[in-house]
Image (spheres, rainbow, N blue to C red):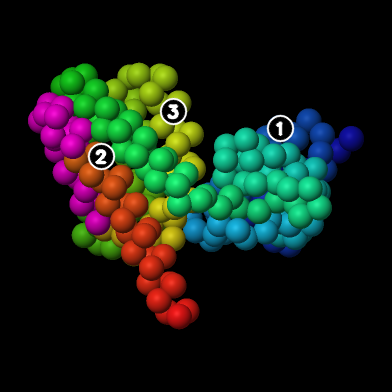
Amino acid sequence: MTTLPVSPQAVATQHSAPLKIGEQHPQLFAVIRDKLRERILSGEFTPGDRLVEGRLSEEMGVSRIPVREALRALAAEGLVTIEPRRGASVSVLSDAVAYDMVEVRATLEGLNAKLAAQRRDEKTVERLQAFLREGTEAARSEQLDKFLALNSQFHEMLATIGGNVVLTDLMRSLRDRTALLFAPSNMHRAKQNWDEHSQILNAVIAGNGDLAALLASQHVHNAAKAYTDTQQAQHASVA
């Protein structure tokens, strides 16, 4: 069976010809899963939004099969909820669950930052300083897309330095789920996010584990407060 080459650009093109499922199916599934995850975490899809297989497959120029599998994978991550007769939608977190997740994430991010400060070496410090300069320049020149990408890379970089595989896996899962809360305020909070990340990076570079842990924990709580403020403002505008 002849298959068409698959690329993220091809998948993202709304009017591209449908891609046949064959040898490239695993790659196609991964591209679609990652694209849908990105759209959820960026706030393009918000909690409660329906994710209709037919519409998504048409937008991406693919059949329903890889879209269906991508939605199932995102459901396993907690980002999507699939219900009989209703289909898939972006997960909605209750206030109680959201509070519990923020509490746990704040603790884990604090531990991660502390480990990074304790385990950084000279080569790592150079990488962190370069990363800090890059982010500061992006903030100064208001390169929003680059800014948001660097904010995302920040957590993975600290996890790599911290070197605790179990902690990294726990945080990655929790980070995606709490991102459902933080996505609506990500754009207008981008600069504040970077300012807080910069403070954490400087504490890690200095080897101050206690300060890095405190700042990382506060960062999560600040993001949660921004979400609460956004929700209250929306409710006030409706009322």
Residue that mark 3 sits on: 170
Residue furthest toward the right?
1
Q: Is residue 180 left or right of residue 60?
A: left
Q: Residue at x 70, y 51 (%)?
A: 88
Which quadrant does the N terminus fall into? top right
Residue that mark 1 sits on: 26
Q: What is the three-letter code of the residue carrying label 1?
A: Pro
Q: Is residue 2 magenta?
A: no
Q: Residue at x 58, y 50 (%)?
A: 91
Q: Nearer the viewer, mark 1 or mark 3?
A: 3
Q: Secondary structure at mark 3?
A: helix
Percent x, y of residue 139? 25, 57
User: For the residues marked 2 and 3, what is the alpha-carbon distance in whole angstroms?
Assistant: 16 Å
Q: Residue at x 30, y 45 (%)?
A: 220
Q: What is the three-letter code of the residue carrying label 2?
A: Ser
The quarter of the picture where residue 116 lies is top left
What segment carries the magenta color?
192-214
Percent x, y of residue 217? 25, 39
Q: Secondary structure at mark 1?
A: helix
User: For the residues marked 1 and 2, what is the alpha-carbon distance in whole angstroms?
Assistant: 37 Å
- The first of marks 1 and 3 along the sequence is 1
Can residue 50 be seen in the rendering of this structure?
A: yes
Callouts 2 and 3 close, C-beta under 8 Å: no
Which quadrant does the C terminus fall into? bottom left
Q: Nearer the viewer, mark 1 or mark 2?
A: 2
Percent x, y of residue 178? 44, 45
